[in-house]
Amino acid sequence: MPTTETRPGAAPPRHLLVSGDDHAGPPLPGFAPYFDPEHRDDFDRYWRARPSAPLAEAAARGDRDALAGFLEAFMRATGGSPAQSRAFAERALEATLGLFDSDVRKAHLDAEGIVGEVIFGDGFVENQPPFSDIMEGNGQLFGGKPWPFDLQLAGARAYNRWLAEFCAEDPIRRAGVIQLPAAHDVPALVAETKRAREAGLRGGVLVPPLEPGLPGYHDPHYDPLWAVAADLGLPVSVHGGNARAPDGPDAYGASEPLASFFHFTESTFFDRRPLWFFMWGGVFDRHPKLRLVFAEALAHWVPQELLRLDEMVDMWNARALRERLSKRPSEYWREHCAITATFASRGEIELRHAIGLDNLLWGSDFPHPEGTWPITPTCLRHAFHDVPADESARMLGLNALRLYDFDEKALRTHADQIGPLATDVIQPPTAPPSDYVGMGLR
């Protein structure tokens, strides 16, 4: 008989599955009503100047052909063959509508067995948080200059308003992540964080991007932001590629796809960078309630990195550093950090005790093509087969409940109906469908 409580050392018949990394956002014109009046003209010029503006406008009106066109173009741009891209666009169209259609989204997540999700911004179908991309990119993704701060802030506020409404359509299951601009005006970021949390966003705060002229995350410049995040119980999140290289606009150049390849290659370093900034810089000591989450991230690097950092703090010439720190790096990790292994690999799950069984979360990346949709049950069996059910339960959902303040009782009621059976997840995987293009079977 299904239970509503999880006993130590036991797992329920069905796993309570929470994705720590999903995405949402309408095609750009859909953000227009959420801008303050003084920035509506700026936003109108912004999206209308983009090469895909007619397609985005049609998609925002619900034109399915326009949305399919975005999907096909995305797959072609990322290396898919014409036939493969066309087939994916046809198959994924319904799920992609879930980026901004609540009913479609719920239907797909139910089919996947997912009862809760942490939602980040997007960019899959010309639906990124406004002004969070580069200025006058025209197809260039990462080598250009950022937009002015006031426009970045206006775009983040508009996105947060939209996301708060979207999450309010299913508040028990959705925890939205607050979008912030670069920290040129920290009081403004603090005010937006408080406003967005009051509006209902509880999935954390996306770490502000570093830009030239700004200090590193260890600097007291950021302390008011870290303090309000800790006080509000909001983890600070790094999400695949958002802690971008501050010298990227100058170092990567304007040639695409070369600039993008530089970014993607180096993003694994810059995404990890806040870890040692927060540790060495004493951020966790100044803000003992603060949590730092690495989302849409590979997790295999954690054990080796913690070993390296522990070795560094033990070096003969690190006495001054040791005198400043209250804990060893591996201890900071265990107490303050978590990592969402989006499309977790079998190898990463085998490292679960070295990473930290209570520090490891699972992510679907819905509805992106590299994620586990639409074969999440197969991906779960691939990564978690033969893992004790009580350990899988923690990584697949219970850790996320603790971190993101989900209502366990409410989610358990739903999980008892649709969650993946623990007796299925523990079995070896079945053969995947031939047309699956994601990375959920690493």
Image (cartoon, grey):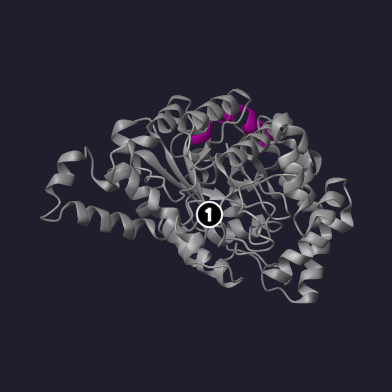
Any part of residue 414 in sight = yes
The quarter of the rendered structure image containing the C terminus is bottom right
Q: Residue furthest top?
A: 198
Q: Would residue 127 appear left or right of 282 to someone viewing this image?
A: right
> Who is closer to the viewer here, 389 or 96?
96
Q: Quadrant of residue 140?
A: bottom right
Give 187 or 92, whichever is nearer the viewer: 187
x then y, percent, for residue 93: 81, 56
- Name above or below for residue 248 compared with residue 60: below
Nearer to us in this view, 226 or 311: 226
Q: Give, as a three-letter code, the residue at label 1.
A: Gly
> Outermost residue, left direction?
316
Residue at x-position 28% and y-position 39%: 282
Callout 1: helix, strand or loop?
Answer: loop
Residue tagged by mark 1?
Answer: 240
| Residue at figure coordinates x 49%, y 32% from the top left | 234
351 horizontally vs 427: left or right? left
Q: Is residue 39 above or below residue 198?
A: below
Residue 181: x and y in percent read 54, 41
Magenta segment, principal secondary structure? helix
| Viewer-nearest residue: 264 or 43 | 43
- Rendering coords of residue 291 (x, y %): 41, 37
Q: Image quadrant for the N terminus? A: top right
Q: Which residues are magenta?
A: 403-415
Residue 1 in view, yes or no: no
Q: Residues within 10 Å of mark 1 (few under 14, many from 20)?
A: some
Give how far across and how far down residue 303 sits, in percent. Answer: 34, 57
State left or right for residue 311 relative to residue 113.
Answer: left
Residue 154 located left or right of residue 360: right
